[in-house]
Image (tube, coloured by chain):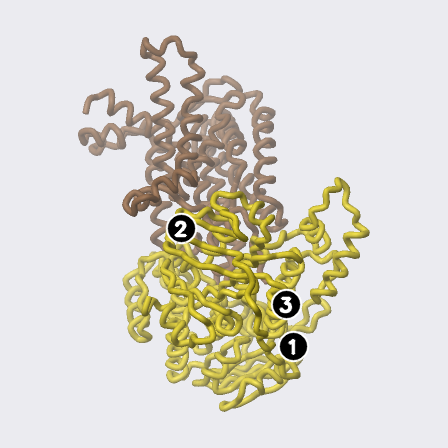
Amino acid sequence: MRLELKSIHKYFGLVHANDGVDLTVESGTIHGLLGENGAGKSTLMKILSGFIRRDSGEILLDGRPVEFHSPAEAIRMGIGMLHQDPLDFPPLSVLDNFLLGREDGFVQNRARALADLKRLSSQFGFDLDPETLVSTLTVGERQQLEIMRLLSLGVQILIFDEPTTGISLPQKVKLFETLRLLAKEGKSIIFVTHKLQDAEDLCQRVTVLRRGQVTGQVEHPFTASQLVQLMFGQNLAVSARQAIELGAPILEMRDVAVEDYRLRVPNLNLQVCAGEVIGLAGIEGSGQRLFLRACAGLLPPSAGEIWIAGAKMNRQPYHKFLERGVAYMPAGRLEEGLVPGLNLAEHFVLVGRSKDFFINWGAAQSEAQVKIEEYSIHGVPATRVESLSGGNQQRALLALLRPDIDLLLLEHPTRGLDIESTLWVWNQLLERRRRGTAIVFASADLDEILEYSDRILVFSGGRVAQALVAKETSVTQLGELIGGKGL
Amino acid sequence: MNNTLIQTLASILASSSPLVFAVVGETINEKAGVTNLSLDGTILLSAMVGFAVAYTTNSLYLAFFAAMLVGMLVAGLVAFSSIALKLDQIAVGFVLTLLCTDLSTFFGNPFVRLPGPAVPYLPIPILKDIPVIGPIFFAQNVVVYLSLLLIVAAWWYIFKTQPGLKLQGIGERPAAAFARGTNVNKLRFLYTLVGGSLVGFAGASYSLFVQLGWSYHKTYGIGWIALAIVIFGGWNPVRGAVGAYIFGALQMLGSFAQGVPAFAEIPTQVFQTAPFALMIIALLLVSNESIDHFFSGSPVSRRIWRSLRGAPPGALSTTFEQE
């Protein structure tokens, strides 16, 4: 089905989120939609999938203008969207999820749904147990379920919103295979992303949005630098790595085992020196979070010894870790890092550890203002943290870190950030490293791991490979280890 | 089986039936994501109204109908304030509990300790003569039969029908349910009313059947127990009903124990309040994290234990706003 968007406008208050966007997607093609955070991609796709109404403009399907007022109506017209966080029901089973929303009589027709599911599964080579709970599936598997569900509802145009975030390399390969297959069958695919490599690998055509407007469209073959120029208006230089002399050991793990109720990671042996960057690679939930939390003193190890700056830290309370210069930045920015409901100035007061009973708000405001400028956070001292964008929340978190940190633990430090923010965050981190901070970070982005780490620990289902030297490691090698090969 | 045991089981089934209505009703609206915390007050008020209507009109149909209307009215207030006005469900429910309790005292004044009509005994011919099962299940009245029917019907509706799946969906993740063409807030309103009407029915079945007549604070506390049993039952009507029967059995046990000479020294209040305390302990056991950890040792014990626990609907007590 051929899709045309003509002169779409959408305002949120004073913000002109979509400013006359034109977009044509031919049937049987994979069309990339690129842009940094806040460029208007999500708004445009929400309009197209019926979640929000456009203020003006036209949507044409095969040349016919169409109107819809809800996602369900959009699906009936043949437009379905896969959300970055799949919009499904984790506590229900795969089959229940598949059934929910089908117009198929009063009593559930499980046999028919099962047959549909089986047919689609074999068509795409997916392997999902219909009775398993969705909460036990990986994001990649949940995407597969959503693809099958939308197809069973007769969807012809599929929108994928950042589908490669949070899935493993093999799953990504599988996803791309599936997308190509869908395009071959005549479906139109819109692939929303900010990953240049993904767009290059997959898309026949790419449209770039910037500040609500289309800045250009390129046809395959195109280069990444072309895209970067359209996205940012200039070429961003990747910071060159400085060689750094390593200092004294900061973190030492001796035969450490960490575990929670579902996973045990044994035999951790590692020494991290001042100024060193260690990347933790692996599918999410393979033990990286346990590792970081153990280093931060939030999870007591079940065996072995953890030494920090020459002191044994087993069973020590969290604040002792803080005193020793350990800091932990979790992935859940609003859930674990910041306090929703409090503004930036209040956050700086919170971490200020002033002993005074009363707060000097005047001083706090100006101190916050200084930090906001220093860390280029888009906000004012009175801005509540939940109204900041992801990138700005991350900047705020970095601004909240104490200056004198010896061991910085980071979980997905650049997840969901655009290229500009990502580079900014890493420049901050590398600056700390230059001053002798040891950095341990977990990331799902292999390029990030390879680019910034000195050594890499690969986690796979609770097993950990020997630390690899990043300079001598390739993506393929990492991908295989993550998949459990050679461990 | 001896006769005493059969009699006991039959009377547990009978005396727990109002609680079953309340538990299943609340399970339905909580499945949809709405907590109706006003249960204790609603049961009192509908018990009073049910009795008053039966006393003045002598019609049991009208009495139950009026009680269900009361339940729907209170539930309607909870639904309206939480869905339309986006107020906190817990706060509204709590205030309504207090209001309904006082209203029942105020309007129920003329009806205190009067003899009134009761739901008649209605054994089902032939079926009642089946050994053991007959006297337990089929020598009861309409309220008990309906309560049994309700358990099965609610379970079947929630887990086996398409609308039931949608009901689960709007309570788990309203945004996803909306994306699949569900009118989330309309359905939440509807199911809250359905749940409320069942709670109202529960109230009338106290004053017209289990504890005949009306007096101040007659069913005080039972609504809170019903709310606890919904959690105990893991938001499943069948398991909730089992919880209601266990509570009924504990109460029965209390009155038995009072007759045992060895327990004569213990004040009767202990036996009256023990089921409440035991229910809370049971609830703690089911929802306690460290006990969960204890059972997680082996996969088998974890599997059994997890099946006893139920997670609350993901979007319970939250409001849904379409973008």
Residue picked out by circle 1: A212
Q: How far apart are marks 1 and 3 (CA)?
A: 33 Å
Q: Using the image, tell me which numbered label, if any, was put on residue A431.
A: 3
Local secondary structure at mark 3:
helix
Q: How crowded is mark 3: few (under 14 residues within 10 Å), some or many (20 or more)?
A: few
Q: How far apart are marks 2 and 3 (CA)?
A: 33 Å
Q: How far apart are marks 2 and 1 (CA)?
A: 46 Å
What residue is at 47 percent from the left and 36 percent from the top?
Answer: B227
What residue is at 42 percent from the left and 30 percent from the top?
Answer: B281
Residue A189, percent across and down? 46, 79
Residue B56, percent across and down? 51, 26
The kind of residue on which mark 1 rests is Gly
Q: Closest to the observer: A335 or B50? A: A335
- The part of the image, by quadrant, that contains residue A267 is bottom left
Local secondary structure at mark 2:
strand
Residue picked out by circle 2: A259
Q: Which of marks 2 and 1 is in front?
A: 2
Q: Which of marks 1 and 3 is in front?
A: 3
Q: Colour of chain A?
A: yellow
> Is there any visible trace of residue B129 in the rendered image?
yes
Q: Colour of chain B?
A: brown
What residue is at 35 percent from the left and 11 percent from the top?
Answer: B263
Q: Using the image, tell me which numbered label, if any, was put on residue B67.
A: none
For marks 2 and 1, the one nearer the N-term is 1
